[in-house]
Amino acid sequence: MNKKKILVVDDEVSITRLLKLNLERTGRFEVREENAGIMAVPAAREFRPDLILMDVMMPGMSGGDVAAELRDDPALCQIPLVFLTAAVKREEIGGSTARIAGRLYIAKPLNVREVIGVIEQYLPPPQAATDRAGENAA
């Protein structure tokens, strides 16, 4: 099975490590961690992720700045990007996800099952695609 590549960018090492361990534990994802916004674009060029999970507020280069660079790069602009943020509380949005400027974001503290659910919105598991193909053939 081809593992989906996920790039996790957050200045909090504990968050990137937690996501890496839990996502890789599923056996469905290969995860690369970066802990500085300035490293996100070079990491994306090298790693070629299927999806990027990125903190909004980071010192030096914010998630918004990184998103703009990704958008302007023809080789990277099609990679789905989901923001992670502690700036908005779950109670404020009535759940764990919402949109900022058209981009999905997940409110911290993170729930790994919810993160996986969001990833699956963008990158359905191969089994789900096979199941749907079987339904159409019947």
Image (tube, rainbow, N blue to C red):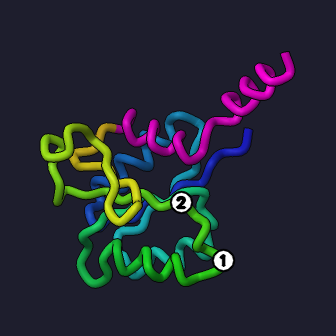
* Other residues around mark 1 within 10 Å, as few (<14) / some (14–19) / many (≥20): few
Residue 39: give x, y in percent of width and height: 44, 78
Residue at numbered disc 1 = 75
Question: Which residue is found at the position 74% from the left and 38% from the top?
Answer: 1
Question: Which residue is found at the position 32% from the left and 82% from the top?
Answer: 61
Residue 57: give x, y in percent of width and height: 24, 70
Position above or below: 29 against 54: above
Left or right: residue 48 compared with residue 105: right
Residue 70: give x, y in percent of width and height: 51, 77
Q: Nearer the viewer, residue 43 or 98?
A: 98
Q: If the image is split into quadrants, where does the C terminus sit?
A: top right
Q: Secondary structure at mark 1?
A: loop
Q: Amino acid at mark 1?
A: Ala
Residue at numbered disc 2 = 80
Q: Nearer the viewer, residue 40 or 92?
A: 92
* Other residues around mark 2 within 10 Å, as few (<14) / some (14–19) / many (≥20): some
Q: Which residues are magenta?
A: 112-138
Question: Which residue is found at the position 35% from the left and 69% from the top?
Answer: 35
Asked which quadrant contains residue 123, the reply is top right
